């Protein structure tokens, strides 16, 4: 959160209040967290704050407490002494209601059993947890796996982020290659043209990859299709994020492709002179977090496609059945190795020591812990010191 590491290590003298943007649906059950909040003499919530949206109370111990304006209006609080409430389950609790919003939009595209799977997605989640129960790892759950399920799309993004990071590391180290990050865009289109526009992007990209100058430098790429919605103009913005693997000598070679050439070529293959921008960047060695995030995060944001049925339909029909993440060349080879567990030495070890199994069930507005037991020694052995299976992504 916006505090330095030093501040994180010790609880701050005063709780820090921050405004929360967006909706946080789990706020009604504030009583559940009362145990962890001690009364104090200072009036922490001012009259002015009360009128605002709910606040996060940052405890300085890696925990967040969410407080709701109506319940805390006359109560005084100080820091938090400890407890189960943690960022990880909060995240799940913000995704599940979004799934329930989207079900009303996706329902007409699903069979009865599909609707049921989507609706019941993550009704229960079983987690491995550490001693403090603030680090969780999914053991089992009834996820639906649908592309337009906000819960499942988020989980997929975390898995993709891990994989893409590993592929890049492998290609960088084993093959001694460097990367460039390119964003290809075109002017926005209306809903009715979105589907054909994406097809046009795909074709144009294939043409681009066949051009002599690119064939010379391209050793493989990962390409991600992303579509955003512009509310003001009520139109859609499909675009590609691409990481190309190149020889480290590329940047100083005569095959180097200048930004204006990228732009010209992209205009040419798209047959569209109105394109004004192509963003090209060198990916810094061992610092590819931002690029990995761009490639891994959702193709479409639920905050976009959840806005109305009309918008949902546009996204759904344009993206249905479409491959959104494409691997080529060195990346395609690396992807095969990854799937065959042959790149495991590039995956980090999960250092968390898991001791509990927690069962969370979806309540009315949040996940509630309903069962807790200690892990057996076999279970501990299996889950501890295992490879990471996901990395966090910045969403929204
Ligand atoms: Zn789901």
Image: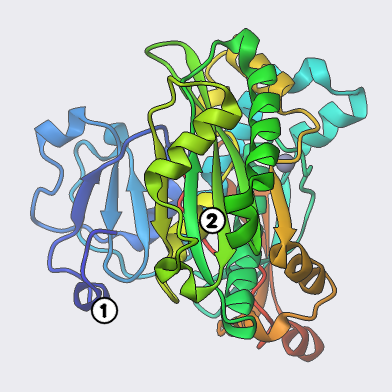
* Res. 303 mark: none
In the displayed structure, would residue 271 be above or below residue 131?
A: above
Using residue 342 as the reference point, say whether residue 94 is left or right of it.
left
Task: Give residue 171's position: percent from left, percent from top.
Answer: 63, 75
Task: Give residue 247's position: percent from left, percent from top.
Answer: 55, 72
Q: Is residue 296 at least partly visible in the picture?
A: no
| Residue holding disc 2 | 89
Using residue 195 as the reference point, say whether residue 12 is left or right of it.
left
Task: Give residue 380's position: percent from left, percent from top.
Answer: 72, 86
Using residue 267 as the reference point, say whether residue 53 is left or right of it.
left
Mark 2–mark 1 Cα distance, whole angstroms, equals 21 Å
Contact between labelled residues 1 and 2, with CB atoms less than 8 Å apart: no
* Residue 149, image quadrant: top right
Task: Give residue 308's position: percent from left, percent from top.
Answer: 56, 13
| Residue holding disc 1 | 9
* Residue 233, image quadrant: top left
Q: Nearer the viewer, residue 368 or 61?
A: 61
Q: Residue at x 80, y 74 (%)?
A: 337
* Residue 58, image quadrant: bottom left
Q: Which one is earlier in the sequence, the residue at label 2 or at label 1? A: 1
In the displayed structure, would residue 361 be above or below residue 149?
A: below
Q: Residue at x 82, y 68 (%)?
A: 336
Mark 2, secondary structure of its residue: helix
Mark 1, secondary structure of its residue: helix
Q: Check the image and tell me how it is coloured.
A: rainbow
Q: Nearer the viewer, residue 281 or 361?
A: 281
Q: Quadrant location of the C terminus?
A: top left
Q: Quadrant location of the N terminus?
A: bottom left
Q: Is residue 69 at least partly visible in the picture?
A: yes
């Amino acid at each position: 959160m916006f505090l330095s590491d030093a501040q994180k290590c010790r609880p701050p003298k005063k709780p820090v209040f921050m405004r929360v943007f967006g909706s946080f649906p789990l706020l009604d059950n504030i009583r559940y967290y009362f145990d962890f909040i001690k009364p104090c003499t200072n009036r922490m919530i001012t009259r002015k704050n009360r009128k605002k949206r709910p606040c996060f109370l940052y405890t300085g111990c890696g925990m967040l407490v969410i407080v709701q304006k109506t319940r805390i209006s006359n109560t005084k609080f100080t820091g938090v002494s400890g407890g189960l409430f943690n960022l990880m389950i909060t995240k799940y609790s913000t995704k599940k209601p979004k799934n329930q919003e989207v079900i009303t939009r996706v329902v007409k595209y699903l069979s009865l059993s599909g609707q049921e799977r989507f609706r019941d997605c993550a009704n229960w989640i079983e987690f491995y947890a550490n001693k403090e129960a603030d680090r969780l790892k999914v053991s089992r759950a009834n996820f639906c796996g649908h592309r337009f399920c906000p819960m499942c799309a988020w989980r997929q993004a975390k898995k993709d982020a891990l994989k893409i990071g590993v592929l890049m590391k492998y290609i960088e180290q084993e093959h001694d290659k460097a990367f460039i990050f390119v964003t290809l865009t075109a002017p926005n289109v209306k809903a009715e043209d979105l589907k054909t526009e994406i097809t046009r992007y795909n074709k144009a990209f294939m043409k681009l990859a066949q051009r002599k100058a690119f064939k010379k430098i391209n050793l493989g790429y990962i390409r991600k299709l992303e579509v955003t919605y512009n509310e003001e103009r009520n139109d859609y913005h499909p675009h590609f994020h691409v990481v190309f693997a190149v020889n480290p000598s590329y940047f100083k070679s005569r095959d180097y492709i200048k930004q204006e050439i990228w732009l010209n070529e992209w205009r040419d293959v798209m047959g569209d002179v109105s394109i004004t921008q192509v963003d090209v960047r060198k990916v810094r060695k061992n610092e590819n977090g931002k690029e990995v995030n761009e490639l891994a995060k959702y193709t479409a944001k639920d905050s976009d496609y959840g806005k109305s049925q009309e918008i949902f339909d546009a996204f759904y029909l344009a993206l249905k059945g479409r491959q959104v993440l494409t691997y080529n060349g060195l990346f395609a080879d690396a992807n095969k190795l990854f799937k065959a567990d042959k790149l495991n030495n590039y995956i980090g070890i999960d250092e968390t020591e898991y001791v509990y199994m927690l069962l969370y069930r979806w309540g009315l507005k949040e996940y509630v812990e309903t069962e807790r037991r200690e892990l057996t020694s076999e279970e501990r052995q299996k889950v501890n010191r295992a490879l990471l299976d996901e990395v966090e992504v910045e969403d929204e």
